[in-house]
Image: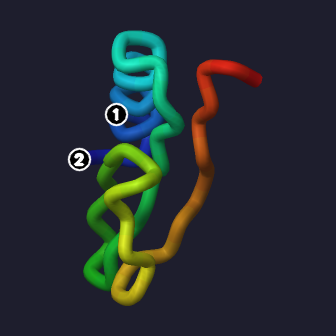
Amino acid sequence: MSRKDAHAFAASLAATLMVSIVVFQVGDGIFGAVPADEIDGDEVQVLVEVDPWA
């Protein structure tokens, strides 16, 4: 997914699930978004964390 789509998806997930969502980029340039407690961080570059409580 594109960076813009990943940020929009993260904002939607954070608002719906009321948990922190991390937007990340993997080595081949693909972006993604997952709940913060599910990210390993070993093979991804974390770009931003969306916190619905902040």
Q: Is residue 49 left or right of residue 13?
A: right
In the picture, residue 47 is in which quadrant? Answer: bottom right
Amino acid type at circle 1 is: Asp
Residue 26 image point, x, y percent: 33, 75
Label 1 Cα crowd, 10 Å radius (few <14 / some 14-19 / many 20+): few
- Assess whether mark 1 and mark 2 are in contact (beta carbons under 8 angstroms): yes
In the displayed structure, would residue 17 be above or below residue 9?
Answer: above
**Residue that numbered label 2 is attached to:** 1
Q: Is residue 42 left or right of residue 46?
A: left
> Residue placed at 35% from the left, 86% from the top?
43
Residue 29 image point, x, y percent: 33, 72
Q: Quadrant of the C terminus?
A: top right
> Residue placed at 23% from the left, 47% from the top?
1
Residue 17 tag number: none
Amino acid type at circle 2 is: Met
In the displayed structure, would residue 39 be above or below residue 10?
Answer: below
Q: What coloring was used for the rendering?
A: rainbow
Task: Give the CA separation, mark 2 to mark 1.
Answer: 6 Å
Q: Secondary structure at mark 2?
A: loop
> Residue placed at 32% from the left, 47% from the top?
34
Q: Is residue 16 left or right of residue 54?
A: left
Task: Kindly give the residue lying farthest to the right in the view shown.
Answer: 54
Label 2 Cα crowd, 10 Å radius (few <14 / some 14-19 / many 20+): few
Residue 5 tag number: 1
Task: Kindly give the residue lying farthest to the top in the view shown.
Answer: 16
